[in-house]
């Protein structure tokens, strides 16, 4: 049984944190003074009832062994264009010179390789799904490490871990400028920071280099919705997203922006285990976790979640953010995603950190593969995950269209059929004859129609 801790115990826990992670000193001084940010307050609330045993319990299944390696990934064509492309529709993976990311704790990769609950405030940016730069592809699969296979000199991949609440230089964050705990109303500030950073970064040709930015934000708005239904409304979500994308389009040349669709969050309520770690889930996303099953509050939140998705589609399935050297692309692979499950049907907890809310490296790698695949699939044919239970297989850029798809979907094309994982073309499929490829396309269409 987990015993309730006293104030003396809590102060002892803080001392443990300080001794284990010296960089926490600044953040914890703010905690003790009552001046820390929302995330730190939520974290302290979550561990308030931890025993010393629970605080230090190790969970090796949630970490990546040091000797782990992936099989190599090779494609028939990994070359860059003969000349630097001027059109956003003709950019190959090897043409990308700069990679960046904005968002919240899912992009800072908080707790992603933590061995115990004391490591949750560590931001493992170097293994983050969209921009982590640890080692190579064979060490950890991230979008940045995949792009590095095509262009080893790409700038911006996050090289190190950081600690939430403490300032970190670009030498540690790379161009991962996401901030743990941020809501969508914070996105314009992140965007301004990124633009100024790119414009002034030595070794980067701001006007000529092709840049790839990934944005995933909005799930904290769902988590906080019940606290302020105006501030975290769908209208404000779209307003701040629009404002940020307009800033980028007006000021940054030669950029492709991946806007990743947010998750359907109701199923995260099932990510539970009778451990104190899951108390953090209630602290981080109380508006989702606390309402009773079938309650009006929960039904309203589920509807708001769906409305966020629909309105984002309406915003981006147009040519509003498309020009010759700039494009914003909605990548929908997570739109219907169900949490990973074991053969028994229970949630596979190895995908989730000790807080039962964020992803471990195992989860980050699946996000990276889903995003990469979407980048090389046209609107109307983009793969969407039904469940993360089975590993996603990476695809190669198609030989007949080796470019990142950037042409926006036509207005009204907001409903995209779910492409079964088994129907996603693999590296071997790309070498098949045109007739077999055509048969695969017809198969996708039949499957999608049957599911309607």
Image (cartoon, rainbow, N blue to C red):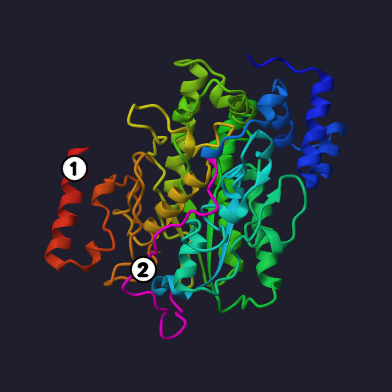
Q: Are marks 2 and 1 in contact (CB under 8 Å)?
A: no
Asked where in the image residue 104 lies, by quadrant, the reply is: top right
Determine which of the numbered discs, if any, sits on residue 370 in the image.
Answer: none
Q: Which dot, 2 or 1, sits closer to the camera?
A: 2
- For the stretch drawn in magenta, the main secondary structure is loop
For marks 2 and 1, the one nearer the N-term is 2
Q: CA distance from mark 2 to mark 1?
A: 33 Å
Residue 260 on image: x %, y %: 47, 50
Q: Nearer the viewer, residue 367 or 190?
A: 367
Asked where in the image residue 24 lies, by quadrant, the reply is: top right
Q: Nearer the viewer, residue 333 or 21?
A: 21
Question: Magenta residues, as a range?
Answer: 62-88
Residue 338 versus residue 113 in the image, above or below: above
Mark 1 lies on residue: 449
Residue 378 on image: x %, y %: 32, 59
Residue 210 on image: x %, y %: 52, 73
Determine which of the numbered discs, if any, sits on residue 74 in the image.
Answer: 2
């Amino acid at each position: 049984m987990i015993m309730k801790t006293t104030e003396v115990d809590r102060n002892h826990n803080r001392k443990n944190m300080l001794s284990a992670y010296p960089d926490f000193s600044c953040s914890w001084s703010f905690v003790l003074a009552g001046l820390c940010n929302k995330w730190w307050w939520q974290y302290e609330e979550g561990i308030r009832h931890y025993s010393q045993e629970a605080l230090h319990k190790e969970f090796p299944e949630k970490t990546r062994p040091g000797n782990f390696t992936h099989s190599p990934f090779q494609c028939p064509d990994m070359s860059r264009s003969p000349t630097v492309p001027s059109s956003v529709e003709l950019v190959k993976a090897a043409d990308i010179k700069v990679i960046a990311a904005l968002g919240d704790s899912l992009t800072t990769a908080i707790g992603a390789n933590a061995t115990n609950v004391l490591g949750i405030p560590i931001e493992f940016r170097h293994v983050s799904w969209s921009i982590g730069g640890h080692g190579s592809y064979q060490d950890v699969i991230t979008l940045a490490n995949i792009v590095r296979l095509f262009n080893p000199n790409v700038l911006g991949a996050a090289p190190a871990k950081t600690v939430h609440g403490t300032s970190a230089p670009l030498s540690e964050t790379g161009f991962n400028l996401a901030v743990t705990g941020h809501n969508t109303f914070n996105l314009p500030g992140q965007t301004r920071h990124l633009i100024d950073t790119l414009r002034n970064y030595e070794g980067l040709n701001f006007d000529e280099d092709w840049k790839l930015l990934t944005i995933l934000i909005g799930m904290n708005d769902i988590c906080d919705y019940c606290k302020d239904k105006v501030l975290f409304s769908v209208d404000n979500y779209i307003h701040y997203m629009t404002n940020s994308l307009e800033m980028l389009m007006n000021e940054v040349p030669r950029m492709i922006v991946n806007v990743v669709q947010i998750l359907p969050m109701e199923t995260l309520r099932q990510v539970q285990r009778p451990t104190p770690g899951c108390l953090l889930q209630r602290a981080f996303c109380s508006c989702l976790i606390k309402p009773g099953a079938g309650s009006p509050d929960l039904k309203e939140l589920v509807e708001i979640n769906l409305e966020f998705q629909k309105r984002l589609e309406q915003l981006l399935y147009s040519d509003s953010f498309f020009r010759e050297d700039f494009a914003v692309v909605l990548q929908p692979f997570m739109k219907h995603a169900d949490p990973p499950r074991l053969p028994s049907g229970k949630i596979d907890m190895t995908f989730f950190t000790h807080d039962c809310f964020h992803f471990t490296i195992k989860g980050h790698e699946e996000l990276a593969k889903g995003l990469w695949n979407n980048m090389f699939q046209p609107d109307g044919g983009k793969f969407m995950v039904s469940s993360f239970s089975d590993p996603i297989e990476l695809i190669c850029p198609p030989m007949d269209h080796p470019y990142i798809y950037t042409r926006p979907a036509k207005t009204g094309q907001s409903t995209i059929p779910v492409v079964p994982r088994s129907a996603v073309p693999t590296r071997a499929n790309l070498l098949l004859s045109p007739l077999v490829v055509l048969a695969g396309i017809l198969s996708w269409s039949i499957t999608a129609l049957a599911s309607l």
